[in-house]
């Protein structure tokens, strides 16, 4: 499957688990970036469609039906035009909300909310996949980091059990699972996202905690087992990452 066909499939089947689609998602480069953008768009669209129903809408429809049922046969009194107008108004609200969220999402998405969504979306699943696996191909790992202008020290490279390109509030980033002395650690690297205050810790919906910190470029979030010293882990990881000179993301 070439890149053009992959992008077309992302538009028509964004959640496809086809073997070729999954391989291209993990391949890095343009394919992985396109997949990350697609995931980001689908998440924005899903949130946009959760438009609350106007208060009292059901009661208004029931009342209108009751009044129309009392009218003589053949006298509609504008029932259907009004119901159609209500439906049109709801459709317009959904369309406008979708447009605004998708267009403005990079500037408006809260980083903590994004991390919580990302963790719920595939955090535990990625941990489970990485738990029984051996270290991946070092060249593939380095290729993913290189996509974001990062160089990784051998000591950290040995701890990587899974890495892939993932969505961030401001474009593509890296989702990494590490095997450490304190247990498995999930790292989200966000190359274009800066935290309003650093460091900070947030509690995720399932009770896990995410430690987030700004780096020289971008930021990262760490999620580890309860009791792990995530601030110290973050410092160690940051020391083992460097930015290639002259690289802009």
Image (cartoon, helix red, strand yellow):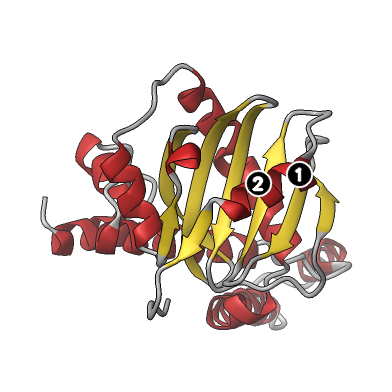
9 or 204: which is nearer to us?
204
Determine the residue positioned at 56% across, 78% down: 95
The residue depicted at 80 percent of the width and 37 percent of the height is 229
The answer to whether 189 is drawn above or below residue 70 in the figure is above
**Residue 42 at least partly seen:** no
Image spot of residue 23 (x, y percent) = 25, 41
Q: Position of residue 224 (x, y in %)?
A: 71, 35
Res. 78 image quadrant: bottom right
Give the quarter of the image for residue 145.
Answer: bottom left
Quarter of the picture holding the C terminus: bottom left
Q: Residues within 10 Å of mark 1 (few under 14, many from 20)?
A: few
Q: Find residue 205 and name its label.
A: none
SS at mark 1? helix
Q: Give SS at disc 2.
A: helix
Q: Is residue 25 left or right of residue 83?
A: left
Q: Nearer the viewer, residue 73 or 151?
A: 151
Residue 220 lies left or right of residue 241; in this view the side is: right
Q: Measured from the top left, where is residue 243 in percent x and y?
A: 46, 67
- Horizontal relation, residue 84 to residue 165: left or right: right
- The circle drawn on residue 232 is 1
Residue beneath disc 2: 236
> For the point 83% across and 63% down, which residue is it?
66
> In which quadrant of the rendered view does residue 63 lie?
bottom right
Q: Are marks 1 and 2 in contact (CB under 8 Å)?
A: yes
Q: Is residue 121 above or below residue 91?
A: above
Task: Give the camera-side residue of 183 and 165.
Answer: 183
């Amino acid at each position: 499957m070439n890149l053009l066909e992959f992008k077309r499939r992302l538009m028509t089947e964004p959640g496809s688990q086809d073997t070729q689609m999954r391989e291209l998602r993990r391949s890095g480069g343009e394919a992985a970036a396109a997949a990350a953008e697609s995931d980001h768009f689908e998440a924005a669209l899903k949130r946009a469609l959760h438009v609350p129903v106007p208060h009292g809408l059901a009661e208004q429809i029931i009342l209108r039906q009751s009044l129309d049922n009392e009218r003589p046969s053949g006298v509609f009194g504008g029932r259907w035009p009004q119901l159609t107008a209500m439906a049109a108004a709801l459709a317009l609200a959904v369309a406008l909300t979708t447009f605004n969220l998708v267009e403005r999402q990079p500037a408006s998405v809260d980083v903590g909310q994004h991390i919580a969504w990302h963790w719920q979306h595939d955090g535990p699943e990625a941990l489970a996949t990485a738990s029984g696996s051996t270290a991946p191909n070092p060249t593939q790992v380095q290729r993913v980091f290189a996509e974001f202008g990062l160089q990784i020290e051998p000591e950290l490279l040995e701890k990587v059990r899974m890495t892939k390109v993932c969505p961030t509030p401001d474009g593509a980033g890296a989702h990494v699972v590490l095997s450490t002395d304190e247990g498995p650690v999930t790292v989200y690297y966000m190359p274009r996202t800066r935290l309003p205050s650093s460091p900070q810790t947030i509690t995720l919906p399932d009770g896990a905690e995410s430690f987030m910190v700004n780096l020289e470029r971008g930021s990262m979030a760490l999620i580890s087992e309860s009791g792990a010293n995530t601030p110290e882990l973050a410092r160690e990881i940051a020391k083992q990452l460097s930015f290639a000179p002259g690289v802009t993301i």
